[in-house]
Amino acid sequence: MKIGIVCYPTFGGSGVVATELGLELSKRGHEIHFITYNQPVRLELLGNNIHYHEVTVPEYPLFDYQPYELALSSKLVDMVKLHKIEVLHVHYAIPHAYAAYMAKKMLIEENIYVPIVTTLHGTDITLVGSHPFYKPAVTFSINKSDAVTAVSQSLKDDTLRLFDINNEIQVISNFIDLEKYKHNEFKDCQRGMMAKDDEKIITHISNLRPVKQVHDVISVFNNIQKEMPAKLMLIGEGPEREKAEKQCAELGITDKVVFFGRSNEIDKILCFTDLFLLPSLTESFGLAALEAMASGVPVISSNTGGIPEVNMQGVTGFLSDVGDVEDMSKNAIYILSDETRLQEFKNNARKESLKFDLHAVVPQYEAIYEATLAKCILT
């Protein structure tokens, strides 16, 4: 199949999943066309089966805000016609599903029929989409899609609760390439670059937005380091970084916290991590937690959104109410204070992550493409 993928080309979870999906589909013989305003960050190699088409928005004095949706729709029309794209898979309801539908209607005028598969990732539903200003557009985009998927049961439930949906939503979980998390190439001596032998390594990865509760990450770590030698690895960049640095200074733990910013060595850091913290206000899925588990790292998290579908209570880690720093701290210390117990949680985390291997999940998307194409031909 020739598949067009529209996504945000950033470090966020939806962009990562969309890119990894496209890469795996290309390995399975499909021709993939990424259509977005920048080359996706994890799209390192282009080839015969992988193509990238940039969406440019011309600047006109008439517009205070340049119309990206219009530019995207026009680009989709051009790319479908030029490359004979058979299916459009868009990640995020707005603006991508909305723009894809407009492209579809323009193409129908030329007797070209291209089905739209829309994947909901989270903030397009729970944050942006639920705003009264956007709600009609989100509802319209979801209902007009030929197939709709959500990355967790929790997100599906939220969508049906917040919007008047008459379309079927299929849950297809996020996934990871487990081959990337074997860490056979890393040597034990490299751990010494991050922490001393007797220090536990605690890690948090996010875009450091308020929803990630970075202040709770630091508070939990502060309680951990009072009980045992430990280092905190904070990976990511975002608006809460300055506050986080100030909090560390106030607590007197600046020398025990490493701010990595955006990093391409996440797998190496996770390789030597003992515990992962994810105390978010909400997560549609919890991809960062899954990446940690794939590296054999137990997770201390909030019990919100789709996280309980990934982090198994008392098995791969522990779940606590949002903001319950004391409970998170108690559970973290419980795991870390006994080496045998820690190893058991690590083994469980790795084992649970096997359920989300891309080789088990990607065929579900292929089945949806085939079904929407078949429906399109019949109609």
Image (spheres, rainbow, N blue to C red):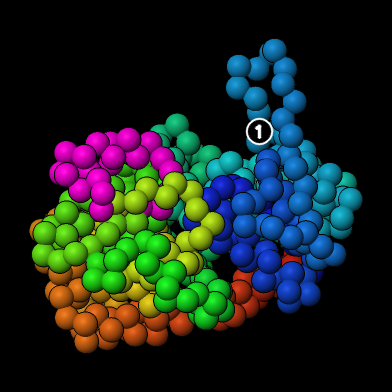
Q: Is residue 21 above or below residue 42?
A: below
Nearest to the observer: residue 262 or residue 172: 262
Q: Is residue 342 above or below residue 199?
A: below
Name the residue rendered at 62%, 71% in the picture. Answer: 365
Nearest to the observer: residue 332 or residue 84: 332
Q: In the image, 140: left or right of 373? A: left
Name the residue rendered at 37%, 48% in the picture. Answer: 259
Q: Which residues are magenta?
A: 234-256
Q: Is residue 63 above or below residue 283?
A: above
Q: State the image quarter where residue 302 is shown.
A: bottom left
Q: Position of residue 29 (x, y in %)?
A: 78, 75
Q: Is residue 191 above or below residue 113?
A: below
Which residue lies under the disc numbered 1? 68
Name the residue rendered at 47%, 76% in the picture. Answer: 187
Nearest to the observer: residue 242 or residue 148: 242
Residue 254 is a magenta residue: yes
Q: In the image, 101: left or right of 183? A: right
Q: Position of residue 321 (x, y in %)?
A: 17, 59
Residue 356 is a magenta residue: no
Q: In the image, 12: left or right of 340? A: right
Q: In the image, 60: left or right of 120? A: right
> Mark 1: which secondary structure?
helix
Name the residue rendered at 23%, 62% in the picture. Answer: 230
Crowd rating for badge 1 (residues with CA inside 10 Å; few <14, some 14–19, many 20+): some
Nearest to the observer: residue 248 or residue 220: 248
Q: Quadrant of the C terminus?
A: bottom right
Q: Quadrant of the N terminus?
A: bottom right
Q: Is residue 125 visible?
A: no
Q: What amino acid type is highlighted by mark number 1?
A: Tyr
Q: Position of residue 362 (x, y in %)?
A: 61, 74
